[in-house]
Every structure is written in structure tokens, then in C-alpha cells.
Image (tube, rainbow, N blue to C red):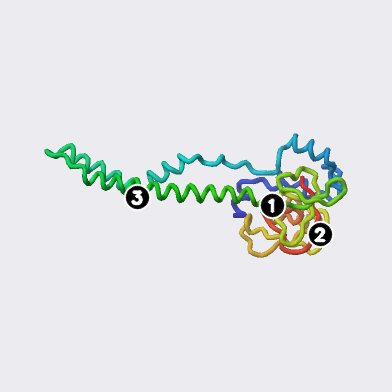
Amino acid sequence: MSNNIKEDVDIKKLYGKSSSLKKDEFLETFHMKESGLSTTEVNNRINQYGLNEIKQAKPKKWYHYFFKSLFSPFNSILLGIACILFYTDVYLAEVPSYANIIVIAILVISSTLLEFFEEYHSNKAAEKLKELVATTTTVIRDGKETSIPINQIVLGDIVILSAGSLIPADLRVLDSKDLYVGQSSLTGESDAVKKTEELDTDISDLDSISDLNNICFMGTNVISRFCKMCCY
């Protein structure tokens, strides 16, 4: 996975500047502060940049599931047989016979309805469950730690994470001690990676996201210890 990322993403361009700066320089350059944002700043940034979420495809309508079920591989074979039978038993026959075609039609209808209701209801249940599961994270707002949905994180937020926390956005480490993060979802590495406040590698030597030891990536998770990070 890391090789694909290397080919498709310019690591130095995306993360070089933000990772190579010292902590104080980073905060000054990007106009950020460890005391966090005010409610007014948060609202302004949400209006400017939008929510912290990936756009998802619109939920499918019922007829998408129906036609998918109707033209499943099994039904497609049966429909093909029905066409042949219509030619041989009806079109060519002196006395048309619809018996076999009717049997096949019943099988197709039964198969379609069973598969349609099963898939449609299971997908609807999954969508409802997804709406109920609201993942939150802790940030500093108005000088106080507060829990918010991850889609409410904005640029400049100071995020507080601990063992087991999901990393809700690309974050620069500001304060940590023995911080280890699991990046297997991105790089395939099974071992946890140690993260520190400053970059250990020279910017000219950045080759993959594994070299960015002071940047944590959205979707990865904290394995151990407490840390303070900044969304940028």
C-alpha cells in the first residue's frame, strides 16, 4: 500500500512544510495556538471550509436493488432459457405450449423478490445503524476540553487523544510521550509506529508516509499514551 501512496501522492509537497517546521514555527506559520479556537472561529471555518467528512454516494433507491436482483446471474440464465423455450415451444410449435415458460417465470419472480427484500432491508438497516453510531473526539474550544462529532473538526483545532482513539483528521503532533499509532490501514505495517513532536528525517529524504513521524493520518488509531495534536 505504501508503494502505491508513494506513486500517487507527492509526500514532500503535501506534508513537507508542515512536518519540517519546529513546533513553535508551525503554530506561528499556520496562525494556530495551543489554547484552541473560539466558537466564533469554529463557525467561520465551518462556513469557509465545510465539515470534516468525505462525501459519500447517495443512498440507492429501491428500484436499483430490484433490477440488480432481477438480472442476477441465476435469473439471467433462466431468462435466457425462457427466450429459447419461447422460440421452440411457442414460435415454432404447431400447438404453442407455455407451461415451461410459466414455470421459469415463477422461479425468476420468486428468486427476484427473495433477493430484493433481503438485500434492500439489510442495506436499510446498515444505513440506520451508521446514523446511530456517532464517533466523537475531544478538542479544546474556548479554552476548555469538549467532546464533538469528528465531522465538526476544523483547521486549527487542538485535538486531545489517548489510547484507543481514532485519529479524526490529518494532525500534527504538538505534545506527546511514548505515543504509538497503528497505521496498518494505510501502509500495511502490522507494528505500531512511534510518533514524536519533531521530524526525525531530513525533508529531502522523505520517501513515504512512514517517514512522517510527527504527522498522524485520518483513519489510523492511537495504540498507547496520551497526545495533543493540531488539525491543519
Q: Amino acid at mark 2?
A: Ser
Name the residue that disc number 1 marks. 135
Q: Is residue 90 left or right of residue 205?
A: left
Q: Mark on residue 92?
A: none
Indicate which label's residue lies in the foreground, 2 or 3.
3
- In x, y percent, where is residue 98? 21, 42
Q: Please give the residue where the numbered disc 2 appears in the rendered image.
A: 176
Contact? badges 2 and 1 (CB < 8 Å): no
Cα gap from disc 3 to disc 1, whole angstroms: 40 Å
Residue 10 left/right relative to 47: left
Q: Earlier in the sequence, mark 2 or mark 3?
A: 3
Mark 2 to mark 3: distance in Å? 57 Å
Which of label 2 and label 1 is nearer to you? 1
Q: Position of residue 88 (x, y in %)?
A: 18, 42
Provide the secondary structure element on which disc 1 rests.
Answer: loop
Q: Are marks 3 and 1 in contact (CB under 8 Å)?
A: no
Tell me the residue at 79%/60% (across/down). Answer: 226
Which labelled disc corresponds to residue 74? 3
Q: Residue at x 83, y 38 (%)?
A: 40
